[in-house]
Image: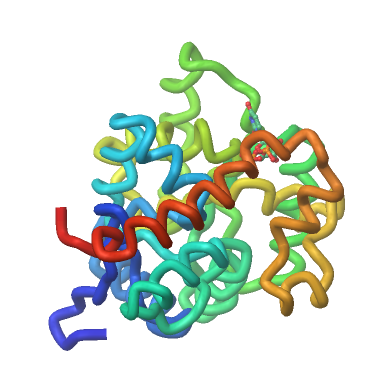
Amino acid sequence: MKADGVIPTVPIFGIRVSKVDMAATVSYLTDAIRDRAAHQVITANPIMVMAALENPAYMEIMKSAELVVPDGTGVVWAAEYCKQPVAERVAGFDLLHELLRTGESYNWRVYLLGSTPEVIRETASRLQTGYPGIIIAGYRDGYFGPESDEEVLTDILEAKPDLLFVARGADSQEPWIAKHKARLQIPVMMGVGGSFDVISGKSRRAPKAFQKLRAEWLYRLLKEPTRYKRMLALPRFAVKVVREKDKVTKEQ
Ligand code: UDP
């Protein structure tokens, strides 16, 4: 990381993706918590990049995030292909755990938002057992509409968290955080997708073999074939990167 605390990035179709490794990411966010500087952290994958290219409002959210990390293998590959490689893949699931591990020595306060009431209760309990040094300052499920936003925001603000993890699916969690981040002003506000389902034991993360082959997406596709439609974004992303190689990392 640079001495001034600014994270080096590579633009992927105009979205500034962090180039630093997991350790530097955690250290940067630790400073953010110390300085009470609000950060929306987005864990980018090709599906989200393609969604942003097709939807200006979503692009605006990706661009205004304070930190975008390369979660998807496809994003890591694109940066490498365009000769501006990132240090390593920074998966949201791993980042969540690394932050909690680090947070143990600071007694960070964590708010968990999303998934079903059953899953979130079990997630809160397992994380508290796994990381006794952190404080689960609050949690609630993610099945609510805009009419409940005010109540949810009040509950989060009263809990005074250092970190807010939101698991509501990429279509809605990132826009929800973006909409409310100015009010929330939490140092780390991060969408974590299906992570609570995995932590609670409801679903499984891809086995190591798939992870090694950089094919977690394939595992998910096999487990949830209905995902195939949105996964068509993966080959479309790859084709676009190859076709537009000279434009991919151009400043916009
Ligand atoms: N979820 C939620 N509220 C909703 C929809 C989904 O809290 O209105 C939760 C869901 O229970 C799961 C997580 O969001 O824990 C991710 O959902 P999904 O896998 O459908 O989203 P994706 O990651 O595929 O976008």
Location of residue 115 in the rendering, given as x and y in whole percent from the top left corner:
69, 37
Residue drawn 48% across the image and 33% down it: 155
Locate residue 163, reporting x and y percent. Answer: 46, 56
Query: Quarter-wise, where is residue 2 in the image?
Result: bottom left
- Residue 123 in percent (x, y) is at 74, 52
Coloring applied to the structure: rainbow
Q: In percent of the image, x 56 and y 75: which residue is there?
A: 98
Residue at 43 percent across and 67 percent down: it is 78
From this view, report whether residue 134 is shown above or below residue 199: below
Please identify the residue farthest to the front as the structure is shown.
Answer: 243
Query: In the figure, 179 relative to 136: above or below?
Result: above
Q: Which quarter of the rendering shows the N terminus?
A: bottom left
Q: Please, is residue 203 above or below residue 178 in the view?
A: below
Counting labels gives 0
Decide which of 225, 138 is in the foreground and name it: 225
Farthest top residue? 147
Which quadrant of the figure has residue 32?
bottom left
Residue 241 point in image, percent of width and height: 41, 59
Ligand 1 position by quadrant: top right
Query: Who is closer to the viewer here, 106 or 45?
Result: 45
Corner quadrant of residue 104: bottom right
In-image side of 243 versus 201 (left or right): left
- For the residue pair 222 and 237, the one nearer the viewer reads as 237
Q: Nearer the viewer, residue 93 or 36?
A: 93
Relative to 117, is 12 on the left or the right?
left
Q: Residue at x 53, y 63 (%)?
A: 74
